[in-house]
Image (cartoon, coloured by chain):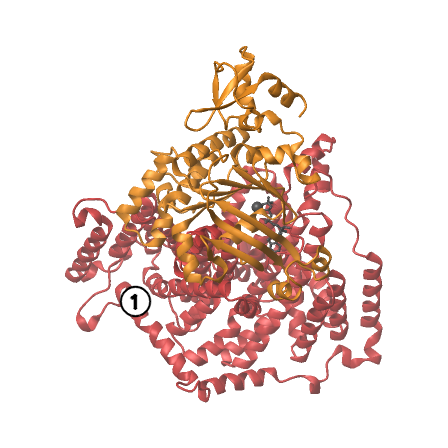
Amino acid sequence: MAEAALPARLPRLGAATWIVALAVFLAFAVLGAAAFPWAFEMPRAWHVPFAAWFGGFVKWLLNDASFGLFTFAGLTRFIAAALELPYRIVLGILSTGWPAAGLPPLPWFGVIGLAGVLGHRAGGWPLAALVAACLGFIALFGFWDSAMLTLASIVIAVPIGIAGGLALGLLAHRVPWFARAIAPVLDLMQTIPVFAYLVPILILFGFGPVAAIVATLTYAMPPMVRVTMLALARVPAEIVDLGRMVGCSRRQMTWRVMVPAARDALMVGANQVIMLSLNMVIIASMIGAGGLGFDVLSALRRLDFGAGLEAGFSIVALAIALDRLGQGLARLRSAPPTGGSWAARHPHLLAGLAVVLLSGAAALAWPGARAFPEAWQLSTGDFWSRVMREINVTYFDTLEAIKTTLLVNVMIPVKRFLLGLPWLGVAALLAFAGWRLRGAGLAALAGGLTVLIALTGLWEQAMTTVYLCGFAVAFAMLIGLPIGILAAERDWLWSGVRAVIDTLQTLPSFVYLMPAVMLFRVGDFTAMLAVIAFAVVPAIRYTVLGLRGVDPRIVEAGRAMGCTRRQILWRIRFRLAMPEIMLGLNQTIMFALSMLVITALVGTRDLGQEVYIALTKADAGRGLVAGLNVAFIAIIADRLIQAGAARMRARLGLEGAASGPAA
Amino acid sequence: MQVKTGHPRPTARLVCRNVWKLFGNRPKAWLERHGPSPSAEALAAAGMVAAVRGVDLEVREGEIFVIMGLSGSGKSTLVRCLSRLVEPSGGEILYEGRDLLSMSEAEIMQIRRHKMGMVFQHFALLPHMSVLENVAFPLEVQGVARGERDERARRMIALVGLEGREAAFPRELSGGQQQRVGIARSLAADPELWFLDEPFSALDPLIRREMQVEFLRLQRMLHKTIVFITHDFDEAIRLADRIAIMKDGMIEQIGTPEEIVLSPATPYVTEFTGAVPRAKVVRLATVMVPAEGPAPARHLPADATVAEAAPAFRAGADRIGVTDAEGRLVGQVHRDAVVDLMLGG
Ligand SMILES: Nc1ncnc2c1ncn2[C@@H]1O[C@H](COP(=O)(O)OP(=O)(O)OP(=O)(O)O)[C@@H](O)[C@H]1O
Ligand SMILES: [Mg+2]
């Protein structure tokens, strides 16, 4: 740690070699086309039919694969059945009831009452009120039935996701080779767009809620595994020693010492599972989950912004209720048994039973009471439609002019330029960057993955992705950095900004598409706007975190030397926060890539579109290959930026130079 | 603290013979190949970090055995070898004559549960448990029924002076209070061997003094066999019956505080002892001469330090009597001897 010393000017990373490399690259790009046409457009004969291979593999899994005692298809059928049963039960309680047995589902007030009791148990009256308000909001806007469908699959997916992630994380913590084996899989899982594995899951599990739950688990579990591994590794060595010293058995060590000691970090993981599961709601609805996601999607198709927004906020409300309930329950401690009757000792259980019985009886007696009365429902749909129409009518020409200017003068030329680049040159340049930033390993990774993208025959789509993503990230940083800088120095502003970006982050990404489409119709520009709106969040967050995290002693020293406020900001804070800001850039890229796949819905021609087409055609191989290409782009960007940030941190003498946190 | 002079030698509880701990690539096999005591050059050439090198020591029943050394000298590693939290790379450790290193995992677990207690530098309290639950934790692990373990835990909490804070959580306590909880917890299972790894290093100097006094009070009641780690020479002198001074994984000298201060074995030990006021270490037993003439007016026990006798001389006495544990007169100390010791020695 540099003791209150001002950081030296950043030494340049061998600027001369970079300039030479760039010059060679550009010269090749401009002049090389005639001599080496194959370096610009890879001959078809070289393309490797990965898609066909993957497709064949999935078919083989489905039809022939066998593990001796049982077949792979048998296994998926078993998993499906194991998920189906609890799902049906929960669904019966919340939504469908059992008409055959004459049993109605729990009416809306019963569910709210039950949630309130649970809230009271987990966090007293404030939490009970919050949970009830969240569910009430959903009922008020007329999304009750959809929300119960969504809730049913979430109620199944979240506990399995948390428990499974915890189990895998524990195993990885205990068995080193398993940790090594699982690390690259986790990396891939977090960068492959969901759409890519939707098709194989569809093929293996069939269309329906079970496939949706499997997809949700596939998406939401990896972060829990990673968080668990990190959290366990960070348990202080002394606590581990303590556990061994008092003679804990393995089980006691895990459940009485390690897991509780890592609880706070594990809670972050559980929160992630809930949030990611709710993120998946919309995509899951594409493969038959129905529910709120379906409402958002159909609103999007109708371009009904108001309905989409309300459905989106209903998802947010559900997310908040579930998250706070989960946090509260996890913080509960088993109170020592006190005296009194059974009823006095279990007031919440009793209250819950009473709510279920009373509301169930009410629903049986008055079937009309089951649904939330329509007369009470609200809708802001008209209002939003009017706002949008108003904006469109008034500002149509202005908006159109902005769009055209940007497209014609900036975006299209850049797109042409990028599409004209030779794959070989790009691979060489990225390999050079990898070599300069870390060494031969990174060079091989960056260059190799680039060549692999070219070999799949999707080079053009990949470069379109890079172009869209690049623009979106540049704009997101241009917007995010100033906001972050302003907010970092002003507490009141930061608390406001934080509330907004937290909401933005829980709002399903599809919701961003709607206003963009309504104002600018379909196309690259619209896609870019939606991506910017989604990806600006990490740009702001990491800038603020970085600037606020600068060692106050160094700022103090700067002030003592008579630096002006501006000098302190630019010369000290900003430079020291640079590694964090780089990580923010990294996250912005990841967010942008994940959103980009969704914008395929508004007609881009990038890898996202490729994935989406594969989804509609149920072509498992094509979707996976396109998805893997997105993952490769993400991994290249991630590793290069991490290496750059690590170098910077080392140069600034900040701790942990060797180990940049994984994205 | 007890006077050792004249008593039969107490039995050794814990014996280390040529204990080694290397960090590196397959250290056990390497140590077997390179003889019982490899040289520093051989270790460096093989890329081994030697945290503990050829340690011989014995801890006797009922004594406070302090291991003193600077940061990185291998104290923590050594004390973790003694409880096999760290697997030694070579050597022998005998607990009550049984070879600790050949025990199975299950046997060592039983020994840790019932015979050993440990206090940690950073307290190692479980953040999700109350004070009571933390203290009862070793008993819970053993499967002691709730009523009994709570009752024993309450007794331990009272012992360290924290009654009334049973329901508090660690984060609500000050550092000193947290370490009291750590001490109560380490005593809950009534161990015979008590390890303390720099228990007071994370505390403010004033609190540290208070905890040292408290610790000595506890030991006078409990008579545990104690291995106490510190990097603070003053603390070592204040608490120890015997001190082992460690440097670079090796023991430089073992002896009573008096022996170490009066006859340091190596230049390294001399460096530490130079600044220590002799009068605070040397006991009357060392400077007394056979009693003669009329019985002196004032008496002090033989294990009192010279510094403790100083007020008596300042009050005008020119010699004082020295008594043993039973109060019998065994010798006397002259003012001149005391002045000599304080001035130069
Ligand atoms: N797991 C390990 N791997 C490699 N080296 C280790 C390991 N644990 C300890 N060491 C090394 O062993 C030496 C002794 O460490 P130890 O923690 O025992 O010292 P210490 O005397 O307790 O120091 P402190 O007063 O700082 O606690 C140090 O040089 C340390 O770097
Ligand atoms: Mg130590």
Assign the C terminus of chain B to one quadrant of the image: top right
**Rendered image quadrant of residue A462:** bottom right
Tell me, what hue is chain A?
Answer: red
- Depth check, front residue: A329 or B86: B86
**Chain drawn orange, letter?**
B
- Depth check, front residue: B107 or A347: B107
Asked whether residue A478 appears in the rendered view, the answer is no
- The percent position of residue A396, horizontal first and vertical second, equals 58, 57
Asked whether residue A356 appears in the rendered view, the answer is yes
Q: Amino acid at mark 1?
A: Leu
- The percent position of residue B156, horizontal first and vertical second, equals 35, 39
Q: Vertical placement of A495 versus A214: above or below?
A: above
Q: Tell which subunit mark 1 falls on.
A: A
- Depth check, front residue: B51 or B18: B18
Q: Residue at x 56, y 40 (%)?
A: B243
Q: Give the crowd class for mark 1: few <14, some 14-19, many >=20 residues within 10 Å.
A: many
**Rendered image quadrant of residue B224:** top left
The residue identified by callout 1 is A91
Looking at the rendered structure, the secondary structure element under dot 1 is: helix
Q: Vertical placement of B321 versus B219: above or below?
A: above
A369 displayed left or right of A579: left
- The percent position of residue B159, horizontal first and vertical second, equals 36, 35
- Farthest-out residue, bottom: A64
- Depth check, front residue: A420 or A389: A420
Q: Is mark 1 within 8 Å of ligand 1?
A: no
- The percent position of residue A341, horizontal first and vertical second, equals 16, 47
A201 displayed left or right of B263: left
Q: Residue at x 67, y 47 (%)?
A: A654
A321 displayed left or right of A643: left
